[in-house]
Image (tube, rainbow, N blue to C red):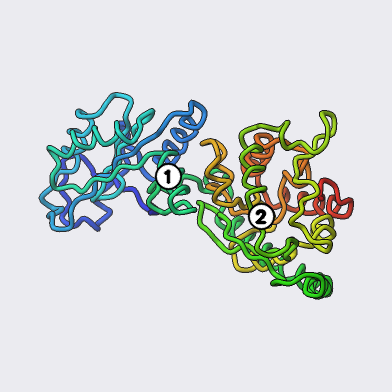
Amino acid sequence: MKINEYLLMEPGISPASPNNSSYYRITSDNIFYDSYFLKQLRLETLRAQRSKSTLSIILLTLNKETDVESINMNEILDTIREKTRDTDMSGFINHKSICVLLPDTDEAGAKEICMKLANENSQFSMTTSSYPDHIFESLTKNGCVQPDAFPFELWDLGEATGASWFTLRLKRGVDIVGSIIALLIFMPVMLMTALAIKVTSPGPVIFSQTRLGKQGIPFTFYKFRSMYINMDNQIHREYVQNFINGNNAKINQGNAEEPLYKIKSDPRITRVGKFIRKTSIDELPQFFNVLKGEMSLVGPRPPLSYEAEKYQAWHLRRILEMKPGITGLWQIEGRSKTEWDDSVRLDIRYIQNWSLFYDLKILIKTVKEVLRCRGAI
């Protein structure tokens, strides 16, 4: 659920029409509205990540059969504040909804407070959600982040970076033009690669896989097939678990001075697969993902669902905050020599400092890294 408007009722006024915005105005007194509410929610999620605690919310929405004109929402808000703790924060979402933020509160605690509020607010329907618990629960059960896992779009690139709507649209325009140009330039290479894969091993030329995009939305991810068909993914599952958990000694294929966090001599990879992986040719079909709007030229890499299930709360920022990309800061500064936590920090640093010029710098450096085949196996 994406919240687009936040309205506050002027004290002492019962609106003749709930859709008439002239009856609402911005007030202070710790009532959150519009970007300020989302900013506060964002700050609370950051605190939850750093302290490894849980942030819960309660959404109270007037039932459809309730006459809005007969309800004094300000009195109800005051009652809610009396029933909640001093550290909890509440405010209007719109003329029919109130939200309560519950820092350092798990699902059980949120339901307890919800029951307390339900006794005196029978005209409301109430829902509770917890961050990050419900997001991880959704990943485990559904293999993706369902929209109701946490009913707010927590991260907005424009809000986070101060980028304008025009700049964000320009990024999308660059993605479209860039992917079309890349497909035209690399089409001969792609055709030869497809032929080589078809001739040397049975199976499809394109390998498709479900990955998680922005906000954990699943999409079909394309690569040239570099493995034999019907191979077990248990090798990769174990590698991912050790990598994310920081068990680097088990997966380091290099040494202490020159680490290599990559599955080396993978028996699942074909002869052609080794070459197209080393030269990054296997990534070329992802320009179709960019053209479709599922990915960007630059951004964090899209994870598999069983990878995201192993994340810590602060790792979630790399999939909640920005559209995934073909290349990114990790590819040019770390790649397979970087430990997991440091690779996530690189993604977060990119998100925090994003600009079109930054994207251009990363794209230029990516070309150099691909030509050097650095960190690729």
- Residue 56, given in percent of the width and then of the height, sits at 36, 36
| Side of 35 relative to 270 (left or right) | left
Place of residue 257 in the rendered image (x, y in percent of width and height, measured from the top left): 84, 29
In the current view of this chain or complex, which residue is farthest to the left? Answer: 70
Residue 102, label in figure: none
Q: Nearer the viewer, mark 2 or mark 1?
A: 1
Q: Is residue 92 left or right of residue 371?
A: left
Q: Position of residue 69 (x, y in %)?
A: 13, 53
- Whether residue 346 is visible to the viewer of this picture, yes or no, is yes
Residue closest to the eye, 197 or 324 = 197
Does 86 sit left or right of 305 as displayed? left
Residue found 49% across the figure and 53% down from its top? 143
Where disc 2 sits, the SS reads strand
Whether residue 362 is situated above or below residue 49 in the rendered picture: below
For disc 1, the neighbor class at 10 Å (few under 14, some 14 to 19, many from 20) is some
Q: Amino acid at mark 2?
A: Gly
Which amino acid is tagged 1? Answer: Glu
Q: Position of residue 299 (x, y in %)?
A: 66, 51
Most foreground residue, 346 or 267: 267
Q: Can you identify the residue that label 1 sits on?
A: 137
Compared with 83, 261 (above or below) is: below
Residue pointed to by mark 2: 325
**What is the crowding at mark 2: few (fewer than 14 residues within 10 Å), some, or many (at least 20)?**
many
Residue at image coords 19%, 39%: 74
Of 202 and 147, the residue lying toward us: 202
Q: Residue furthest top?
A: 86
* Mark found first going from the N terminus, 2 or 1: 1
**Residue found at the far right of this picture:** 372
